[in-house]
Image (cartoon, rainbow, N blue to C red):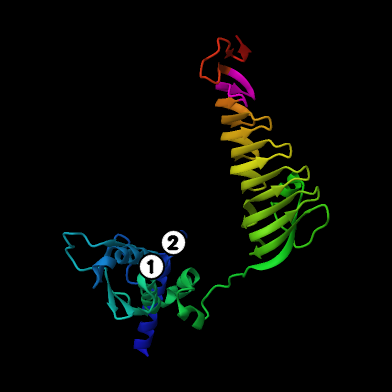
Amino acid sequence: MKSNTILKLYWIFIIIFAFSSCTKSSNIQEISDNENKDLKCYLVARTNTKSDSNFFENLTRSVISKYVVKVDSMPTAGISEKKCIYEVTLEKRNLETFVTINSKDINGYGVSQLKGNDAIQQSLLKALYNSVEEKRGIICNDFGDLLDECAKDNLIASREKTVIGVMYREANITRWIRSGKKWFHQGNKLMIKFEGEIRNGVPNGFGKESMPNGEIFEGSYVDGFRKEGTHDFPSGDFYVGKFKDRLPNGYGTLIFKNGRKYVGNFVDGSFSGQGSIFLRNGTNYIGEFKGNYHGKGTMTTREGTKFIGTWKNGKPWNVDIHETNGQKFLNMYVNGVMQ
């Protein structure tokens, strides 16, 4: 009876000590007998194939540091005392890859019949899964697709599948922002209607937006936001390119019904940065934009005359004029005034 009481007190002491060593910022529980936070742990990674050694060591160090305890590569000079060493061995035999983990705290092995680096990763994760029972849920959330054991033990976190459906969001940009940029399962004809791939409650994948004013967008979505696609306007104009939120952002092409075309960078729906514009009359401008021609650029007419220099708000500012033969005219623009 006395021995049972002593044993209970021992385990109570161990539990209290373990909880007192935890912090809010720690998302990986420390190994129970690694109480000394200043203790450094080292990795010894061995493999019977030289071609895999670097990948195996880097992967092993990363995985053990994430799920067990931070480990460093063994110093060239070695260490004075054999403390906190994780020995991990990789062997390839015929069509199977074996990984074993041995340390003071954990021991286990894993086997894979995959090929190449996938085999190394799977066998290492299986060895860790078999060694550290309290971390199985976390490992399965990260790598459930690689481990059959997770499905058998019902440890894979539920992941919502992609479905085809309909969703709605506010058409007015102010109301859209006030709504938290949310999507809704029910809506009306005054809202933007989405039809396409939905995952995690928002558009994810390919889909189509129909707007109350007749505009149409078709393209790809990530977490509810447009990423790339084609936006058609009722006027006959259309844009093809990248998006951020609801506006063109990044590289794209805007073609107008009257034949004018802009190709280049956009910021929040406006021409910005480097780009080119082509007019119906054969004139083109290549250079910098800030809503309009702004910065360094060259405008070339259909006849070949060039306006080379700096532009401001769509007008020549400090510009030299060159004929088709390259000869520079005497008349130039200085501070927006032709000389």
Q: Is residue 13 visible?
A: no
Q: Is residue 209 magenta?
A: no
Q: What residue did someone put label 2 on? A: 26
In x, y percent, where is residue 210?
A: 76, 54
Q: Are marks 1 and 2 in contact (CB under 8 Å)?
A: yes
Q: Please, is residue 151 above or below residue 1 in the view?
A: above
Q: Residue furthest right?
A: 189
Dot 1 crowding, Cα within 10 Å, few <14, some 14–19, many 20+? some
Q: In this orientation, which residue lies closer to the viewer: 143 or 38?
A: 143
Q: In this orientation, which residue lies closer to the viewer: 185 or 114?
A: 114
Q: Please, is residue 162 above or below residue 178 in the view?
A: below
The residues tagged by marks 1 and 2 sit, at their Cα atoms, a distance apart of 9 Å
Q: Quadrant of the C terminus?
A: top right
Q: Is residue 314 magenta?
A: yes
Q: In this orientation, which residue lies closer to the viewer: 167 or 134?
A: 167
In x, y percent, where is residue 88?
A: 28, 72
Q: Please, is residue 112 above or below residue 278 in the view?
A: below
In x, y percent, where is residue 147?
A: 45, 76
User: Which residue lies at the image location 71% right of the left edge and 39% below the top edge?
Assistant: 256
Numbered disc 1: secondary structure: loop
- Left or right: 308 with respect to 22? right
- Left or right: 317 with respect to 326? right
Dot 2 crowding, Cα within 10 Å, few <14, some 14–19, many 20+? few
Q: Which stretch appears magenta? A: 301-317
Q: Which mark is residue 30?
A: 1
Q: Which mark is residue 64?
A: none
- Left or right: 16 with respect to 157? left
User: Which residue lies at the image location 60% right of the left edge and 39% below the top edge?
Assistant: 263
Image quadrant in which you'd find residue 27 = bottom left
Type of amino acid under label 1: Glu
Type of amino acid under label 2: Ser
